[in-house]
Image: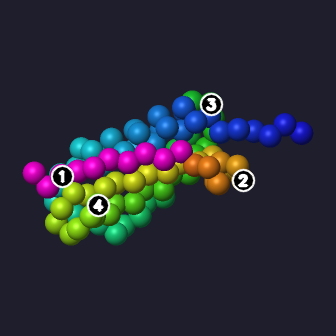
């Protein structure tokens, strides 16, 4: 039985697309999302269904930079233990 491996390029493309939505939000909108988590799903061109986790946190201190972190996996045992991750940093100015 062959073990399916996650298409990391496809997963990263989907994750970055989701992070782009956060990139377009204002700093004030992101402040309102501090401490929240989001768990959207996405389907790649291959038909693979992916699970995404997005977290919005202060990077070092309140009222400073905001970090939006994302991780994506395909729900397989291997993918869940080695997800694809990316993040972005938003400055207050």
Residue 23 appears left or right of 92: right
Query: What secondary structure characterizes most of the magenta part?
Result: strand
Q: Disc number at residue 46?
A: 3
Q: Nearer the viewer, mark 4 or mark 2?
A: 4
Closer to the chain start, of discs 4 and 2, is: 4
Residue 31 appears left or right of 37: left
Give SS at disc 3. loop
Residues in magenta? 84-93
Q: Position of residue 62 (x, y in %)?
A: 21, 69
Which residue is tagged 2? 77
How many numbered circles are shown?
4
Q: Position of residue 77 (x, y in %)?
A: 72, 53
Closer to the chain start, of discs 1 and 3, is: 3
Give SS at disc 1. loop
Location of residue 24 (image quadrant): top left
Residue sitting at 38 percent across and 48 percent down? Answer: 87
Q: Rounded to the nearest whole Å, what is the CA distance between mark 2 and mark 3?
A: 19 Å
Q: Rounded to the nearest whole Å, what is the CA distance between mark 4 and mark 2?
A: 30 Å
């Amino acid at each position: 039985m062959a073990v399916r491996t996650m298409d990391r390029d496809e997963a990263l493309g989907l994750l970055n697309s989701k992070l782009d939505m956060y990139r377009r939000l204002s700093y004030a909108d992101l402040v309102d999302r501090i401490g929240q988590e989001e768990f959207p799903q996405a389907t790649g061109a291959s038909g693979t269904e992916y699970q995404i986790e997005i977290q919005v946190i202060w990077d070092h201190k309140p009222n400073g930079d905001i970090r939006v972190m994302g991780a994506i996996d395909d729900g397989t045992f291997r993918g869940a233990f080695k997800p694809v991750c990316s993040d972005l940093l938003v400055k207050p100015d």
